[in-house]
């Protein structure tokens, strides 16, 4: 404490004795003494204009200036000297990117009016001009256009429109007695002259294309004929080729399937006779000793599966490619559906065309009702989204199932033929009760694709559907019609082609053709792709496993050939 007092004393000695203000804070306040306020005032003195040098910088963030600065001081650069490289525009004061905008109030409507006028006509009113003193020089932009239009805006009416044509006869439109209504011809309207013969012909062709009508000569059904390719139609006992042979090493009359099936390895026969691609093949019911094929060459052929494997008969009667065929239960008759819009019923033995059916739409698939007491009824999936049911005896349509949203591709009977399943281009699967035109089950998922080929498994429990995303999907066929997600067969390319799926009789294997002409064979239990054979040069459109053979598979392709594999 004494050291501090001594230092203060020495500080007091060093200070100027004449500087009373410097020493006054060291003097203790004495009771009763009055100190002058001027002594304790520490505020800085305010600088006057004369004492400030020209060009002093001002802090731009300063809110208050305590003296009167000169013009040069106010407009001097904020920091440092003037930038010699800055343009006049850049050095000018700016409060926005494009320059300095003066605050002004413009009505929203006026602003929009001038903006639209400028975008339409190319001129607008100068906002700085007083509204009372508008002249031709008061516009900016296309001044010539402003003079021409007399400064009209887009919201103001310009030239008067031409008078409306009158829909009257002998009077003004106001004269109600002579007004002929809104659809009447105009007074000065003339009737067009008749088209020339050439124009008329062109017009008819155009209308025919629009209505998708065929040529007139195709409206009548093509003439039916048949060709027998074997010498004798009947053998020494008077039996035709429909008779099931007994001497082929397999009991074709037995309803039982083989116990164990094996993979086919090699090609053992080729049936050739079609000049264009084969579209479908069907085995004779129960026995499978005959093979029926239909082709894009408009012909249907019947072949032997055993013995010499000859072509027995050709059925000719369609004028366009044949799409589908279907045997009756006994095999004595079959139906054919073609792109000429006709479904025809044929006698398998004589080759005679028994009857024809059409509703002027293309049939895509055709199926007999498999019930023994309903062999006079068949259904066909049509291009106009309907499934049509015909009665063979009367030749009339007896039922229509019209619920699909696209052309119907397949019809498959399930559940002891009480129901049938249809698939369509609308990517859905519908289940119908027979003779009830409302589907009781509708299956459509966002992930589903169109399924243009469906096959029922030999045990009647599963439906194999060829999906257009290169998969074979398996649906239950007995109750819920659920997708079996554990059984999806992949590894082949079929997108765009309705390749028919086949099953081995013992349910061991699944077979299908593909777009590359290959025959693909999968294991049913593991869904593993076991075997792949190059079967055809073009698309392999169908693969059938013979119901009484352990390893015989029949394939057909768009190369016009039908092949037997063993």
Image (cartoon, helix red, strand yellow):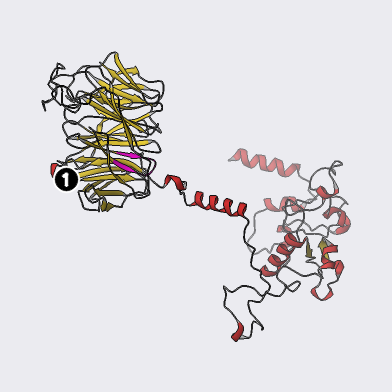
Image location of residue 77, percent across then percent down: 82, 48
Res 158 visible:
yes
Q: Residue at x 87, y 54 (%)?
A: 72
- Quarter of the figure with the C terminus: top left
- Quadrant of the image for the N terminus? top right
Q: Residue at x 80, y 65 (%)?
A: 126
What's the residue at 37%, 34% (across, down)? 468
Q: Magenta stretch?
A: 336-344
Which residue matches tag 1? Answer: 374
* 284 relative to 116 in the view: left or right: left
Relative to 258, 184 lies left or right? right
- When the figure is inspected, residue 542 is found, relative to residue 535, above or below; the finding is below
Placement of 295 over or under 340, stated as above or below: above
Disc 1, SS:
helix
In screen coordinates, is 537 left or right of 143? left
Q: Quadrant of residue 271?
A: top left
- Is 418 located above or below residue 233 in the figure? below
Question: Which of the pair 490/507 is nearer the observer?
Answer: 507
The stretch drawn in magenta includes residue 413: no
Q: Is residue 436 above or below residue 185?
A: above
């Amino acid at each position: 404490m004494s050291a501090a007092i001594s230092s203060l004393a020495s500080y007091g000695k060093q200070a100027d004795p004449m500087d009373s203000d410097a020493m006054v804070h060291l003097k203790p306040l004495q009771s009763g003494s009055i100190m002058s306020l001027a002594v304790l005032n520490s505020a800085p003195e305010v600088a006057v204009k004369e004492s400030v040098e020209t060009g002093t910088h001002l802090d731009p963030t300063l809110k208050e200036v305590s003296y009167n600065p000169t013009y040069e001081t106010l407009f001097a650069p904020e920091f440092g000297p003037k930038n010699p490289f800055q343009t006049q525009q850049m050095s000018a004061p700016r409060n926005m990117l494009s320059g300095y905008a003066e605050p002004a109030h413009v009505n929203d409507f006026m602003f929009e009016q001038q903006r639209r006028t400028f975008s339409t006509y190319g001129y607008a009113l100068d906002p700085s001009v007083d509204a009372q003193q508008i002249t031709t020089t008061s516009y900016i932009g296309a001044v010539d256009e402003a003079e021409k239009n007399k400064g009209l805006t887009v919201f103001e009416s310009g030239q008067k429109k031409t008078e409306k044509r009158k829909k009257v006869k002998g009077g003004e439109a106001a004269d109600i007695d002579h007004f002929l209504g809104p659809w009447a011809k105009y007074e000065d309207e003339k009737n067009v002259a008749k088209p020339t013969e050439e124009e008329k012909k062109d017009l008819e062709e155009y209308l025919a294309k629009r209505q998708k009508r065929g040529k007139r000569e195709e409206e009548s059904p093509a003439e039916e004929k048949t060709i027998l390719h074997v010498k004798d139609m009947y053998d020494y006992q008077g039996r035709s080729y429909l008779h099931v042979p007994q001497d082929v090493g397999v009991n074709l009359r037995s309803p039982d399937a083989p116990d164990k099936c094996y993979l086919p390895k090699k090609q053992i026969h080729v049936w050739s006779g079609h000049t264009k691609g084969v579209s479908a093949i069907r085995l004779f019911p129960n026995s499978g000793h005959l093979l029926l094929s239909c082709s894009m060459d408009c012909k249907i052929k019947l072949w032997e599966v055993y013995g010499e494997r000859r072509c027995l008969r050709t059925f000719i009667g369609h004028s366009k490619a044949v799409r589908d065929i279907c045997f009756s239960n006994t095999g004595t008759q079959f139906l054919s559906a073609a792109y000429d819009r006709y479904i025809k019923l044929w006698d398998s033995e004589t080759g005679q065309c028994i009857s024809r059916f059409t509703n002027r739409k293309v049939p895509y698939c055709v199926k007999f009702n498999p019930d023994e007491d309903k062999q006079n009824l068949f259904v066909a999936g049509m291009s106009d989204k309907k499934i049509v049911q015909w009665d063979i005896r009367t030749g009339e349509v007896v039922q229509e199932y019209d619920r699909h949203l696209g052309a119907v591709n397949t019809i498959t009977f399930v559940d002891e033929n009480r129901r049938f399943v249809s698939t369509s281009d609308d990517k859905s699967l519908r289940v119908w009760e027979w003779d009830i035109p409302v589907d009781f089950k509708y299956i459509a998922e966002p992930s589903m694709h169109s399924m243009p080929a469906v096959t029922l498994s030999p045990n009647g429990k599963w439906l194999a559907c060829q999906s257009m995303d290169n998969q074979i999907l398996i649906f239950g066929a007995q109750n819920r019609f659920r997708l079996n997600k554990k059984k999806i067969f992949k590894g082949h390319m079929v997108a765009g082609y309705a390749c028919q799926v086949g099953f081995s009789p013992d349910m061991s294997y699944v077979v299908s053709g593909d777009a590359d002409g290959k025959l693909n064979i999968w294991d049913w239990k593991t869904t593993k792709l076991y075997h792949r054979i190059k079967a055809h040069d073009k698309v392999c459109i169908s693969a059938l496993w013979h119901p009484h053979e352990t390893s015989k598979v029949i394939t057909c392709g768009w190369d016009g050939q039908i092949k037997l594999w063993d």
